[in-house]
Amino acid sequence: MASLMKKESHRYEHHKTKLGKVWHFLSHEDSWQSFLVDAALILLIGKYLVFPTIGFALDTNYPLVAVVSGSMDHHGQEFDEWWEDNGQWYLNHNITKEQFKEYHKSEGFRKGDVFVVKGLDSEKVKVGDVLIYTTEGRRDPIIHRVVTLNEDGTFATKGDANMDQLTFEKSINLSQIHGKSVVWVPFIGWVKVALIDFINSIMRR
């Protein structure tokens, strides 16, 4: 009986104030309208409160970044096998196998993974770091590895899975960099990846 009375007390009309009725709609209402409003609020709170707060703490506008391409994917290869196929490029750029093994995420990472990003200044960038930066003409940030510290103070990067550098990444300015990867979380970025793939499929029609 007590349980029944408790459920009855949570009915919409039992709330005396507008705030109470709103709270009931958001937390107890079992309807698609309530679900949509809850989802929208979660997205808005995440975008305008949680993300900015995390970004402020980590000193970057991109505190969490999802990987949306396969340019750093080693495709399941063990490191020695991957180096056999790709190592010559790095040897030609004065990076040895032993050095590469010590780099952050030397085994690569996959589409759908997510990185926690921390801001940095030029003195803290080193070869092997995984940088998050933006470049003109590309909507999503690039997540590639530093391969050269250029004499003019810029940086050169390369995707582990790419045969060579892309033109734009041979000279990355500090102003383009939003930080470097400090923590890696697998798979949870697939929500964003799936949404982007869906939008792109519509745009191609």
Image (cartoon, grey):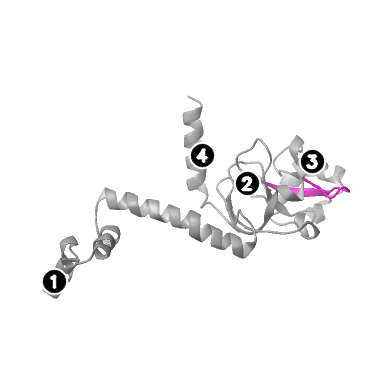
Q: CA distance from mark 2 to mark 3?
A: 27 Å
- Residue nearest the observer in this picture, 40 or 180: 40
Mark 2 / mark 3, whichever is N-terminal: 2
Q: Residue at x 29, y 53 (%)?
A: 34
| Pointer 1 residue | 5
Secondary structure at badge 4 equals: helix
Magenta extent: 143-156
Whole-percent x, y for residue 23 in the image = 28, 63
| Pointer 2 residue | 76
Q: CA distance from mark 3 to mark 4?
A: 27 Å
Whole-percent x, y for residue 20 in the image = 25, 65
Residue 57 has which mark?
none
| Pointer 4 residue | 196
Q: CA distance from mark 1 to mark 3?
A: 69 Å
Tag 1: amino acid: Met
Q: Residue at x 47, y 36 (%)?
A: 198
Q: Is residue 147 magenta?
A: yes
